[in-house]
Image (tube, rainbow, N blue to C red):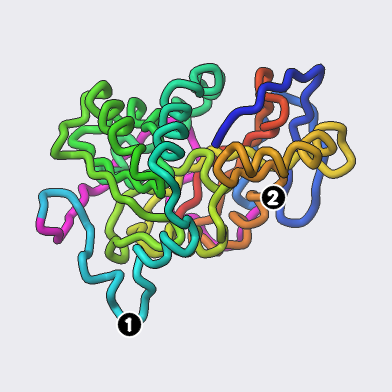
Amino acid sequence: MAILNFTPSSMFPVAIDSARRTRVRGSVIKMQKSLITTDPPASPGFSLCTCGRKHFLGEATTPFLPISPTYASQSTAPNSTEVLNQLRPPKPDWYFELYGYFRSAGMERYEKEIAVYKRKLFANLVGKAETVLEIGIGAGPNIKYYNNIPNVSVLGVDPNPKMESHARKSAIEAGVKSENFKFIHAVAESMPLEDASVDAVVGSLVMCSVTDIPQTLKEIKRILKPGGLYLFVEHVAAEDGTFLRMVQNVLDPLQQVVADGCHLTRNTEDYLLEAGFNGGVDLNKVSLSAFYHLSPHLYGIAYN
């Protein structure tokens, strides 16, 4: 997604649970799992520490890739390439190249500000995941957070084929072995992966631009192993009636055009709470000082 420069005079962080919306002042708001789900957690509550987890046991033909060449052709599932072409019709190479360049070189300010939250969030992967699937991997800005995971293998899904070179470069810079990185040209709504085949799924700035959020979350649940983690960092709609929400409503049509389908007014937290993750969902909200129209941000973990 693209960043439209807009400088704020104030921020409006908001915490939301499944029953009501509440305005809360503060830089970071934590939602307890008890507010979100009545199901017993499959793993401990969201903490910024590490704990043990069994190693990935794949049955793929390569040492780490749980990719099923036949999955997409099964009668019970749509062909992932067909879904890709339906949801993301082919565009000229120059467009993919230009957007790939922007995602690689134009997000430095954003990544610098969000880094403190990403470091805390991705620390939860250590000891819990060896195979990480990142949807909407883009230029691979998150790969550097995986380099402290022993023997990590990374699968990167993105509908833009020109992102592969940028993501591979990021993987090399992060110290991920070339044989431990695989780029998959697909959309998050239909991924050519086996059921229960990855330890963790990561998505940042993804739900703003997917065509079908419920289907994307269904796919995430399908490919995660029981007890697997879905880590997310997303910008979401501001509270109704605020000046920020008015700004988002005005900019949203332009944002969709210049930012490859990115929406500014999606209530992604509602979809996460309704997705039915067995272990519940931990949500945190934070405002960004440099990117007013992208506040608030939602980050956390869903437990499969």
Local secondary structure at mark 1? loop
Of the two numbered discs 2 and 1 on the same chain, state the one appearing first in sequence: 1
- Which label sits on residue 267? 2
Residue 237 image position (x, y, % from top left): 72, 42
Q: Is residue 139 left or right of residue 240?
A: left
Q: Which residue is drawn at 37% across and 75% down?
A: 77
Q: Is residue 15 visible?
A: no
Q: Residue at x 36, y 80 (%)?
A: 76
- Which label sits on residue 122? none
Q: Nearer the viewer, residue 81 or 210?
A: 81
Split into 4 quadrants, where in the image is the N terminus?
top right
Q: In this view, does 201 lie to the left or right of 60?
A: right
Split into 4 quadrants, where in the image is the C terminus?
bottom left
- In this view, the mark in front (2 or 1): 1
Q: In which quarter of the image is residue 191?
A: bottom left
57 falls in the magenta region? yes
Magenta-highlighted stretch: main secondary structure? loop
* Kind of residue sitting beneath label 2: Asn
* Number of other residues with Cα within 10 Å of mark 2, as a class: few under 14, some 14 to 19, many 20 or more: some
Looking at the rendering, the stretch of residues picked out in magenta corresponds to 35-61
* Kind of residue sitting beneath label 1: Ser
Q: Can residue 227 be seen in this view?
A: yes
260 falls in the magenta region? no
Local secondary structure at mark 2? loop
Pointer 2 and pointer 1: residues touching (CB < 8 Å)? no
- State the separation of the CA atoms marked 2 and 1: 33 Å
Q: Residue at x 19, y 52 (%)?
A: 65
- Which label sits on residue 75? 1
Furthest toward the bottom, the residue is 75
Q: Which residue is drawn at 69% across and 34% down?
A: 296
